[in-house]
Amino acid sequence: MTENTMLLNRLTKNLQRLKGWLKQNQITCYRLYEKDIPDYPYLIDIYHDEAVIYEKGKTLDEETEYLRDNSTELISSALQQLLNITPDKQHFKTRSVQKENAQYNKLKNAKQEKIISEHGIKYYVNLVDYLDTGLFLDHRPLRKIVLNSSEGKDVLNLFSYTCSLSLAAAVGKAKSVTSVDLSNQYLNWGKRNFELNGLNLSKYDFLQSDILGFLPHHQKTYDLIILDPPSFSNSKKMTTHLDILEDHHNLVGICLKLLNYGGTLYFSTNKRGFKLDPSFKYAEDISERTIPMDFRDMKIHKCFKFEKR
């Protein structure tokens, strides 16, 4: 069996496994391949008729450079054969250990957006300009949970990024949705996602703020709070730096104070090796339930559910 045949067979097998599930859940963006074959340590995410291919960044010698080039050619050929995704719609990116919030920095300024969908909700994604696309695929199950549990509730989404979880709450008929993020750019992206789904922006709040400064003085209480902070940040816009290992106890504690009785807090982090402060004895680790079926990496994030009783 040639290398090209081996890779194509694996991609075909993965696609066949996902096809029915994708159709049933109206999902047009998904992970097709995740380092399944050791010789091809890549991630391949499909966005309708385009693909984003991530490789791990490292220093390359001449031989490794050649092997990598050969691998990308085989991946490109396999995607074209299986899904008719032409090379101009294949976006290769290098994912290295990020400093601060470097994954949010611009790589290009192509401004090429496309619309994808999941569970009947539409989102704008940008596959070219940033390392990330504007939608975290691993949070798809959490978005479904929020969609199905927000009706009639006041919802707060902290570190909201492009507001995908906020949008799920709004489509799920939440009474109110408040999205808070440090970046106006991403909040504006979120507003456009809301408009894309026919929602009236005047009914929702989008607040540009440093969450560490925002939370201690916030008075309103909520029925559902989503807390998904970065692992680390020391942006100049912040009053102090954020380290999730050091700061999650305080962040979770404040969120629990803002939670109405009977309310729920979802706290998620993609910090590898993260361990929740043992003082939170009543937290439920729901990580396994929030890993999508198209992901092989069961440690992609940790997610905890808190209920105020």
Image: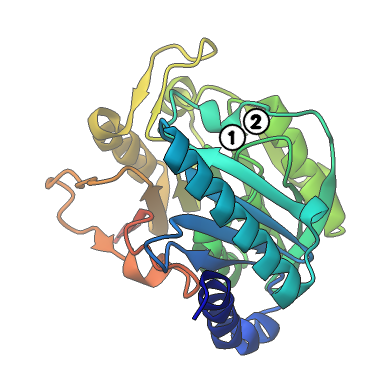
Of residue 42 and residue 169, the one placed in the foreground of this image is 42
Residue beneath the point at 79% across and 71% down: 84
- Left or right of 291, for residue 8: right
Q: Position of residue 149 (x, y in %)?
A: 54, 69
Counting other residues with Cα less than 10 Å from the Cα at mark 1, is it few (<14), some (14-19), or many (20 or more)? many
Residue 165's place in the image compared with 182, above or below, is below
Q: Nearer the viewer, residue 271 or 306?
A: 271
- The residue drawn where x is 24% and y is 36% is 249
Q: What is the C-alpha distance between the residues marked 1 and 2?
A: 5 Å
Given the image, on which type of amino acid does mark 2 rest? Leu
Say above or below: 91 vs 245: below
Asked if the residue under mark 2 is in contact with the one under mark 1, i.e. CB atoms within 8 Å, the reply is: yes
The C terminus - image quarter: bottom left
Is residue 67 visible in this depiction of the protein?
yes
User: The disc labelled 1 sits on which kind of residue?
Assistant: Val
Q: Which mark is residue 207?
A: 2
Residue 172 seen in this snapshot: no
What residue did someone put label 1 on? 180
Give percent across and percent down for residue 137. 56, 58
